[in-house]
Image (cartoon, rainbow, N blue to C red):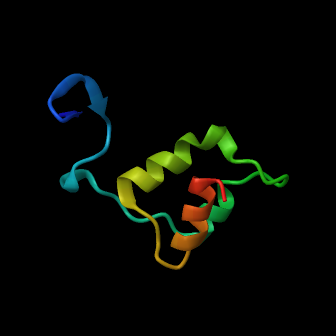
Amino acid sequence: MPRTLRGRSEVVLNHPGPEEKKHALLPKQWKNLFTPDGKVTDGGVKFLKEVLSGGVDPSIRAEVWLFLLGV
């Protein structure tokens, strides 16, 4: 069931609960999310779903956070 943000039913988060958590984004998956010219495939939708559902492998966490923050 979707969760709401601070009881505001109009704001629904599609973040999975603990029972739905998948595996963390792995380095190979991270590299495969980019096209040869360095762009994120499908606008980053798959990437964001992977991160939200399973997190990020510790070995690439710093690189992923820099990407997310646009640094």
Residue 17 horizontal side relative to residue 43, left or right: left
Q: How many marks?
A: 0
Q: Position of residue 24 (x, y in %)?
A: 42, 65
Q: Nearer the viewer, residue 68 or 44?
A: 68
Check the image and name the residue furthest to the left.
7
> Relative to 35, is 6 above or below?
above
Check the image and name the residue furthest to the top.
10
Residue at 45% of width from left, 55% of height from top? 51
Indicate the quadrant containing the C terminus: top left, top right, bottom left or bottom right.
bottom right
Residue at 50% of width from left, 47% of height from top? 48
Residue at 37% of width from left, 59% of height from top? 54
Q: Position of residue 37 (x, y in %)?
A: 85, 52
Q: Nearer the viewer, residue 5 or 26?
A: 5
> Relative to 60, is 47 above or below?
above
Residue 36 horizontal side relative to residue 42, left or right: right
Q: Position of residue 12 (x, y in %)?
A: 28, 29
Quarter of the figure with residue 69: bottom right
Residue 18 horizontal side relative to residue 46, left or right: left
